[in-house]
Image: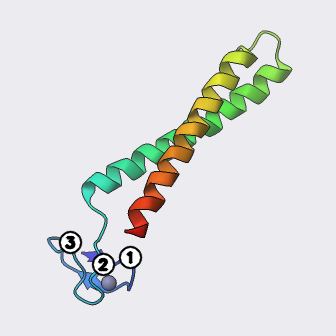
Amino acid sequence: MNRCIDCNSLMTKDEVICNECGSHIPTTKRDAAGMFASLVTLAFWISLAFMIAAAFMPNGPKLSVCFLITGALSFLMRTMNDRDQSVRKR
Ligand SMILES: [Zn+2]
């Protein structure tokens, strides 16, 4: 059983459009994108932790490398959030 994200009414598994309010429920593709987004968010926090660790440990990971990875991940996160919002607006 699914629930509508907008009006919280019950929907069958096969229904993709809500009977009550007509909104689309998230598809499997969207769920995969959401899972990828949470993975990127997790990787971002891990690399941020590594960056902080690198700042205090001379023998630890390289600060410049961690900084690059953290920057790239934060850019990826922002890009995905933007795309997510543009999908919701439609
Ligand atoms: Zn609904």
Q: In the displayed structure, does residue 88 sit left or right of residue 4?
A: right
Q: Which residue is mark 3?
A: 16
Q: In the displayed structure, does residue 11 sit left or right of residue 73?
A: left
Q: Which residue is mark 1?
A: 5
Q: Quadrant of ligand 1?
A: bottom left
Local secondary structure at mark 1: loop
| Ligand 1 within 8 Å of the CB at mark 1 | yes
Q: Is residue 60 above or below residue 33?
A: above
Q: Nearer the viewer, residue 73 or 83?
A: 83
Q: In the displayed structure, does residue 28 sit left or right of residue 82?
A: left
Are the two marked residues, 1 and 2, in contact with CB atoms closer than 8 angstroms?
yes
> Where is residue 66 shown, x and y percent of the image?
67, 22
Q: Is residue 50 above or below residue 83?
A: above
Neighbour tally class for label 1: few under 14, some 14-19, many 20 plus, Cα within 10 Å:
few
> Where is residue 16 shown, x and y percent of the image?
20, 71
Q: Nearer the viewer, residue 74 or 56?
A: 74
Q: Which mark is residue 23?
A: 2
For residue 50, which quarter of the picture?
A: top right
The residues bearing labels 3 and 1 have C-alpha atoms spaced at a distance of 12 Å
How is colour applied across the structure in the image? rainbow
Q: Nearer the viewer, residue 59 or 7?
A: 7
The residues bearing labels 2 and 3 have C-alpha atoms spaced at a distance of 8 Å
The residues bearing labels 1 and 2 have C-alpha atoms spaced at a distance of 8 Å
Name the kind of residue labelled 1 in the image: Ile
Are the two marked residues, 2 and 3, in contact with CB atoms closer than 8 angstroms?
no
Q: Is residue 61 above or below residue 37?
A: above
Name the kind of residue labelled 2 in the image: Ser
Q: Please name the residue shown 46% across and 46% down the image.
A: 37
Name the kind of residue labelled 3 in the image: Val
Q: In the displayed structure, does residue 49 sit left or right of residue 17?
A: right
